[in-house]
Image (cartoon, rainbow, N blue to C red):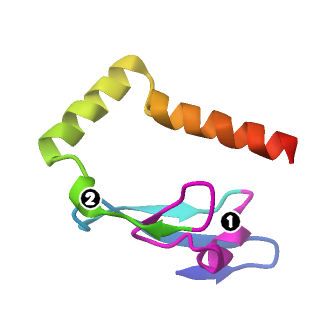
Amino acid sequence: DLTAGSDSVSVSVSESDSVGKSKDVFENDGLFAWMQPYLDLFGYTEGKTTYYGPGVPVDESKFPSEEEQKKLREKAAEDMMNIGMEERERRRQGGEIAYKA
């Protein structure tokens, strides 16, 4: 759902859980809301992930079970960290590549 006013753009995105059930609705009304309609041009669409490039399909068979997801959320809340060390390292490497380029 995309609506535009005279000086703003409002984009509503339905958020899904791992099994595709609709949960809460996220309304992208921030500074970069204008980018939302263009994200699919770069492969950033529902059901895809990115790893240093355009979006690629997500292998849902690798998703953790509902019980494991709950445990991971609790641990992330307890540790106040929702991005694991592997992802942090990947982002650090991406930052170094971008810095050198």
The residue to which callout 1 is attached is 33
24 in relation to 38, above or below: above
Question: Taking 58 as reference, is 5 above or below it?
Answer: below
SS class, disc 2: loop
Quarter of image, res 69? top left
Foreground of the two, 3 or 98: 98
Residue extending furthest toward the top: 79
Q: Residue at x 44, y 31 (%)?
A: 84
Residue topped by disc 2: 18
Residue 74 in percent (x, y) is at: 27, 28
Quick one: 47 or 22, which is closer to the camera?
47
- What residue is shown at x 21% (from left), y 63% (from top)? 19
Label 1: element kind: helix
**Image spot of residue 65 (x, y percent):** 15, 47
Q: Nearer the viewer, residue 29 or 65?
A: 65
In the rendered structure, which amino acid carries the disc numbered 1? Ala
Task: State the separation of the CA atoms marked 1 and 2.
Answer: 24 Å
Disc number at residue 15? Answer: none
Q: Is residue 55 magenta?
A: no
- Residue at 68% of width from left, 65% of height from top? 33
Say whether residue 35 is left or right of residue 23: right
Left or right: where 98 falls relative to 53: right
Q: Nearer the viewer, residue 49 or 77?
A: 49
Say whether disc 1 or disc 2 marks the residue closer to the N-terminus. Answer: 2
The amino acid type of the residue labelled 2 equals Ser
Number of marks in the image?
A: 2
Mark 2 surroundings: few (<14), some (14-19) or many (≥20) residues within 10 A = few
The verdict on residue 34 being magenta is yes
Residue lying at 82% horizontally and 72% vertically, measured from the top left: 7
**Quarter of the figure with residue 37:** bottom right
Question: Which segment did they paint magenta?
Answer: 31-54
